[in-house]
Amino acid sequence: MWLQILSHLDNRRKVHKDAINYCQDILRKKMFDWESIVRNNLSCPIRDVDLVVSVGGDGTLLQASHFMDDSVPVLGVNSDPTQMEEVEKYSNEFDASRSTGFLCAATVSTFEQVLDNILEGRSSPSELSRMSICVNSKLLSTYALNDVLIAHPCPATVSWFSFIIQENGKPTCPLVNCRSSGLRVSTAAGSTAAMLSAGGFFMPSTSQDLQYMVREPISPGEAVTNLMHGTIKSNQTMDVTWFCQKGLIYIDGSHVIHQLQLGDSITLSSMAPVLKVFLPQHLLSSDL
């Protein structure tokens, strides 16, 4: 079995590399300038370009989004889509899933056509809402496209915090005191990821609302049980106060982390620059 797993992983590496080479070959045929950047080498804001092409999966697109404002659109190319027949073949041995590419509008086989549609003005990007994060009234430089997880660094340790949702500086609910495994807040784009797996609900990709869920709350009490999961409207904020000695804010996964300490205040809202994304047809259809 281990040989099969290693062979599968090696094949994934090769397929991804071939996809990058193929996309670069297509770009060389076009009459415009372009530059290739490895995702881990991204360190400066992406500006003064007409289009970003992200070749990989959703993680690659998410990482690119952290360096983009609302002036440049991005096209995601799923370099290694999951093959269901392969997943079924090895289902009793290991997980043969590949890349989900939920936000990717193209694959290798469709890249040139999708790109031509964009260049010739037949496709327009959608505007996806992002989340701003302020800690002690200071805005963090990274906007979340998918979700934010606020939790203790040790997953076995209880997270202590309180939150309240406000609109125009006025509370829309009572203060909620929590002991739990943490707090997850997602955008509409992120509502199909960890939030949905935890029992959340799907949100249209163009929604500007946020969805939140307290993870594994401990004895929340009848008065606030219905506040363990809900939405934050586009004109509202969620204000969180952290009561543990240590804490972390995970932004769009585990690569971007901000440390917390006792007494820190966190403000979350969708008042952030949108991200312009060329979405796959299935997401465009779901918004109709």
Image (cartoon, rainbow, N blue to C red):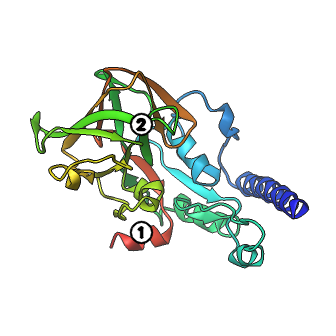
Amino acid, disc 2: Val
Q: CA distance from mark 1 to mark 2?
A: 40 Å
**Foreground tag (1 vs 2):** 2
Which residue sits at x=38%, y=52%?
Answer: 128
Marker disc for residue 158: 2
Front residue (pair 267, 248): 248
Q: Seen from this angle, which residue lies furthest left?
A: 170
Quadrant housing the N terminus: bottom right
The residue tagged with tag 1: helix, strand or loop? helix
Q: Within 10 Å of the Cα at label 2, are there few (<14), some (14-19), or many (20+) other Cα atoms? A: some
Q: Quadrant of residue 111?
A: bottom right
In the rendered image, which residue does mark 1 sit on?
A: 284
Q: Position of residue 216 (x, y in %)?
A: 39, 50
Across the whole image, how many numbered discs are drawn on residues? 2
Figure check: 122 above or below 230:
below
**In the displayed structure, does residue 121 sit left or right of residue 138?**
right
**Above or below, comparing residue 226 to residue 179 in the picture:** below
Q: Amino acid at mark 1?
A: Leu
User: Which quarter of the figure has residue 249?
Assistant: top left
**Labelled disc at residue 138:** none
Question: Residue 58, how many percent across, how many down?
Answer: 57, 53
**Which residue corresponds to the image point at 31% horizontal and 20% vertical from the top-left?**
263
Residue 218 picture location, percent across and down: 33, 46
Q: Earlier in the sequence, mark 1 or mark 2?
A: 2
Residue 211 versus residue 126: which sits nearer the camera?
211
User: Does 141 sit above or below residue 143?
Assistant: above
- Residue shown at 52% from the left, 59% from the top: 103
Answer yes or no: do the residues labelled 1 and 2 have beta carbons within 8 Å?
Answer: no
Q: Position of residue 233 (x, y in %)?
A: 21, 50
Quarter of the figure with residue 26: bottom right
